[in-house]
Every structure is written in C-alpha cells, then in structure tokens.
Image: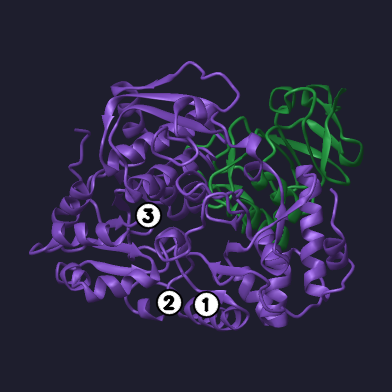
C-alpha cells in the first residue's frame, strides 16, 4: 500500500504513539485487503462505549486508554488517547441508567458504560447511542467517504444516501477516528458500486413487513454482492428502507443496493449496472415471499409469547407513533412484556409527543440507545419472543437461546395483548 | 498431500486440524467468544468449537461486529489458529488482522471443497501456500 508523506509521518510517530498505532493497524488492514492506498474520511461511526466483560477487564488493568488501545486500535502499546481527529459518533450500545430496574441488566455494565461515555465524550466522541445515526443528524452527503460500522447503517448510507463506506469494524473505525484515514477499497471505488444481481419483484411489496422480507431474500440471494430491485414495489420511505437494508445485511452481507428511479446512484436500470449488461432477473414472487416468511418463522414452536420487541433498527418517530396508536387503550397480557427500542435523542421526542405515556399506560416500555441483542438482555424468563424485525428474528434466537415469531406490528401488538402468537402471512 | 496457492491476508505459519464450514459465518450473533463455539441455530457448524483449529469458510456475513468478536476470541484464548477463506471482505480481512493468526485467501482451488473437517492443514501465509493431508491419509 502506498502511503503519503503525511501518512508515513503518522506511522513513524510524528503525531504521537496513539496515532502511530492507529496507522499501524490501517497498514496491516490495508495490506490484508490488498488496498492500493488510504482515503480521507471526516465521518466515523464506531463502537467504543459498549460494555463487555473483556472491556471491563482491560479498564481494570490499565484504564480506558488501555481498553481503547487493545480494542479500538488492536495495539499492545502503552498509549494515551488524544482527541478525535475527525467527527466521530458512538452507535448503539448497552442500556443506560434510565433502564436500571426497568430491564434486567447488570448495574456494573451501566456504570462501566457511564464511565466510557464520560471518557470518550471528553475526547470528542458524540454519544448518539443509536444504530441509525442517519435518523438523528448524522446524514452524510452523496459521495462523502465515511468509516462506519453497523451493517444496517452502512447499507443505508451507501444505498439511500449515496455516501461511501465499507462495513468497517471496531479497530478500523477506532484507527480512522485518530487519523481521518481508511483503506480506499471496496465501496469507496466507483467500479465496485454497480449492481451485480437483478431481482424482479412479482408480488406486491408495499409495507414494512414486505420490505423486510424482500431484503432478507435479497441478502440470501446475493451474499456480499449488490442487488438491484425492480418490479411491483411501492415507493419506499426511510422506515421501509431501514428494514430492507437491515434484513439484507443479516441474511447476507449486502452493503449497497440500488432501486432504479429511487436510490441516488441508479437514475435508470442501465445506470444501476454501469458498464455491464443488465443480467437476467431472479424472480421474487409469491412462492419466494412465502419461503422467506417460513424461514423467519422456523424458530418458533410455542405460540405462548412472553416478549414483544419492536424498533430494530431503532424506531423512527413515525414508528413510535404507530406503536402508540396500536397500543392506545389496550393492556398487555399478564406475563408478557413489550419493548420499543429508539435512538437516545428520539426518546425525548417520544416523551414530549405523549407516545411514551400511551405505550407505558398499556404496559409497554420505550427504551433508548440499546437493544436486546446488543445488551444480551430480555425480560426474565423469556422463552418465546415476537418481533416485526427480520434482523432481530434472525439474531435473537442465537444470542439469547429463545424462540422467535416474525410478523407485522399488528401481529406483534396482538401477541402482546393476548399472550398468543396468531400471525400469518396475508 | 494436496497443495494450493493463494495470497497472504495475515502472515505467519500455522498447522493443525481443519474445521470446514460450507456456509458463511457470522461473528456477532454467530459465535460465542467465551467458548469459541458457533451459536447460530441453523448453521451447519452449530455447537462446534473452532478453538485451536484452522477455520476454513467461504466468507464473513452479518454484523460489523465480526472483527471485534474474533478479536475477543484471541483475548479470551478461544481463537482459531489460522483462517482460510474464499471471499475477502472488510469483515474477514480485519477479523483475521485482529485475531492475529496466519490467514490466506484467493486460493487456486475452492478450499471449502478440497478440505474436509478433520484434515490436517498447514498454512504458510507469507508464501500463500496451503498444504492439506486428508484425514483418511493420516497415520492413525
């Protein structure tokens, strides 16, 4: 990999040991990718404050500087963290103090994270506390090079916003935050941004459930490549594409897709494929739709639901309002809980709009900044959960060892109110 | 013995028993770093441990937590001793870097077809060479 004089200086320690360690990681990472050079980034979305047993041990041994060196730079060096060089935000993480006593989550994790927020905040990290930074003010512009983690945010930034980021990890975003550099590879290059697969939708896809299932199909079909979607689809909104992308990045590793006429880099079908010919389409029809639904519902056997999870990726204000309307005047079944996960900043909007009160009156909880998968936490004794998120239905059985049902918001709210899953594909 | 050639992802030499996945692997939500086990219920290697093995797989899928979870296997002493994969991505590349084990990709044959679980495998990542002795040919 070719380094500029500035980058060589960083590697040689001109800007201190932490920046040198960051550049060392980028050089090792760039070599692993066979990247030709680094590119400049001014927008980093990372995970530094998420508590974990490994992090707790490192903090005990050498404080937060040590935890940052090992986890965020993959360095064994003894170093002191300088301020962030470029704008850096914290993605979703564990539960905060407002969840103490509300959800079963260890107090020492809440304390560890509070310490982390104070430490990293002082060093210039914005604690957005959401998997959807694009919902709370971090909206990169088209063509902007970024270093983002969180697969559902990466696919949204690339596809819907036209920004350029690979699906980075903890160490590469940590290194980018101190250098403003990341390997110029993959999605940063024009030639890697054209579609590879054409999916023709022949069954109507026009709601949140439908977009999520189509995303899950697209990810399963294309793996880490780039689907282009045409056919019988409604004009999607932020919420639809948030679900579509999260699902495609769960069943596969999709980081970029195009919807001709809707997403910015595909004004036309031909443009979506660039210099390559448009390939023959793969059909997504009623049979494929049913197969996805059955896959996502293959991890449930008992219809006794004790937990309903909404807001993955973190809910928009509109989704919070929809959940409040669906729960207004109703009451959750005894022994059933409902959690709605929201960005930290939008919890305030939910409170001030009266949504939180309606949801809490029904027995539900509006929880900020985290999710059951990140925190490995669900209501005590949960055996069977229901969700409207394809991503959460996929992951939570593995992470928590519980059964899953997947359906619409209405299916989920009905399950919360009756304690029974009665969802079906309509 | 079968010999394959590819390119280095992370340098070094490692030799040991292979654990082969024909499906891509999730890091976050796919493995438990505390015990080095695949935990995705529908995965072909569900419940199997990769600690001390050469992990052979088509590629990484899912969350960007991939590299961080494999880094944790190193910090917790449950890491594989080498990696061989087909599809290079930011997840698998950074994951191999922070796991700090010899890793290769871009082999001239499909390692997931050529290598079987239980085969003895030697990776010389600096030279991009993988040697395989099938389990059936190994002395008992």
Q: Is A16 located above or below residue B59 in the figure? A: below
Q: Is residue A279 left or right of residue A372?
A: right
Can you tell which quarter of the image residue A359 is in?
Answer: bottom left
Q: Residues within 10 Å of mark 2 (few under 14, many from 20)?
A: many
Q: Badge 1 is on which residue? A: A113
Q: Are marks 2 and 1 in contact (CB under 8 Å)?
A: yes
| Place of residue B42 in the rendered image (x, y in percent of width and height, measured from the top left) | 47, 37
Q: Is residue A181 left or right of residue A163?
A: right
Q: Residue A205: in sight, yes or no?
A: yes
Q: Is A364 located above or below residue A56 in the figure? A: above
Name the foreground residue: A362 vs B49.
A362
Q: Are marks 1 and 3 on the same chain?
A: yes
Q: Helix, strand or loop at disc 1?
A: helix
Question: Which residue sits furthest left?
Answer: A329
Q: Badge 2 is on which residue? A: A96
Name the foreground residue: B28 vs A174.
A174
* C-alpha span from label 1 to label 3: 21 Å
* C-alpha span from label 2 to label 1: 7 Å
Tell me, by letter, which chain the rendering colours green.
B
Q: Residues within 10 Å of mark 3 (few under 14, many from 20)?
A: many
| Place of residue A348 in the rendered image (x, y in percent of width and height, measured from the top left) | 31, 75
> Which chain is home to disc 2?
A
Can you tell which quarter of the image residue A231 is in?
Answer: top left
Please state, as top left, top right, bottom left or bottom right, where the C terminus of chain A lies in the image. Answer: top left
* C-alpha span from label 2 to label 3: 18 Å
**Tint of chain A:** purple
Q: Badge 3 is on which residue? A: A312
Q: Helix, strand or loop at disc 3?
A: loop
């Amino acid at each position: 990999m070719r380094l500029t004089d500035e980058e060589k200086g960083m590697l040689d320690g001109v800007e201190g040991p932490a920046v040198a360690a960051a550049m060392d990681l980028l050089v090792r990472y760039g070599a692993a990718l066979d990247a030709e050079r680094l590119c400049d980034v001014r927008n980093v979305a990372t995970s530094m404050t998420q508590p974990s047993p490994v992090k707790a041990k490192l903090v005990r041994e050498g404080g937060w500087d040590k935890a940052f060196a090992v986890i965020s730079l993959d360095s064994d060096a003894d170093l002191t963290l300088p301020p962030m060089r470029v704008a850096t935000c914290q993605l979703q993480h564990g539960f905060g103090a407002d969840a103490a006593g509300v959800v079963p989550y260890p107090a020492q994790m809440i304390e560890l994270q509070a310490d982390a927020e104070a430490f990293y905040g002082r060093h210039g990290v914005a604690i957005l506390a959401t998997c959807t930074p694009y919902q709370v003010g971090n909206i990169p512009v088209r063509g902007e090079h970024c270093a983002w983690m969180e697969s559902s945010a990466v696919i949204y930034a690339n596809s819907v916003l036209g920004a350029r980021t690979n699906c980075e990890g903890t160490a590469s975003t940590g290194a980018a935050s101190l250098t403003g550099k990341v390997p110029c590879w993959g999605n940063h290059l024009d030639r890697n941004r054209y579609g590879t697969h054409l999916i023709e939708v022949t069954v109507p896809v026009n709601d949140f459930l439908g977009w999520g299932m189509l995303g899950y199909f697209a990810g399963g079909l294309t793996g880490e490549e780039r689907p282009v979607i045409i056919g019988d689809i409604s004009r999607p909104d932020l919420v639809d594409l948030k679900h579509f992308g999260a699902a495609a990045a769960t069943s596969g590793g999709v980081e970029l897709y195009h919807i001709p006429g809707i997403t910015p880099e595909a004004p036309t079908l031909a443009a979506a494929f660039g210099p390559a010919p448009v390939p023959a389409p793969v059909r997504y029809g009623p049979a494929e739709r049913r197969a996805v639904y059955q896959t996502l519902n293959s991890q449930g056997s008992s219809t006794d639901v004790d937990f309903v999870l909404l807001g993955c990726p973190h809910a928009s204000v509109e989704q919070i309002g929809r959940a409040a309307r669906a729960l207004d005047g109703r009451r959750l079944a005894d022994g059933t809980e409902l959690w709605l996960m929201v960005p930290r900043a939008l919890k305030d909007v939910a409170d001030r709009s009266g949504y939180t009160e309606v949801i809490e009156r029904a027995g539900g909880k509006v929880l900020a900044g985290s999710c059951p998968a990140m925190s490995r936490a669900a209501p005590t004794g949960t055996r069977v959960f229901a969700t409207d998120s394809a991503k959460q239905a996929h992951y939570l059985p593995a992470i928590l060892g519980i059964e899953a049902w997947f359906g619409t918001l209405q299916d989920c709210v009905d399950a919360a109110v009756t304690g029974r899953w009665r969802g079906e594909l309509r | 013995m079968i010999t394959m050639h590819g390119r280095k992802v992370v340098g070094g030499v490692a030799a040991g028993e292979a654990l082969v996945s024909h499906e891509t692997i999730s890091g976050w939500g796919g493995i438990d770093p505390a015990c080095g086990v695949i935990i995705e219920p529908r995965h072909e290697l569900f419940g199997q441990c990769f600690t001390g093995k050469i992990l052979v797989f088509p590629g990484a899928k899912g969350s960007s937590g991939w590299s961080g979870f494999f880094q944790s296997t190193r910090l917790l002493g449950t890491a594989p001793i080498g990696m061989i994969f087909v599809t290079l991505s930011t997840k698998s590349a950074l994951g191999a870097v922070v796991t700090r084990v010899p890793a290769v990709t871009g082999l001239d044959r499909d390692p997931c077809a050529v290598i079987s679980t239980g085969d003895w495998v030697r990776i010389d990542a600096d030279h991009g060479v993988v040697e395989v002795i099938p389990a059936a040919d190994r002395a008992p």
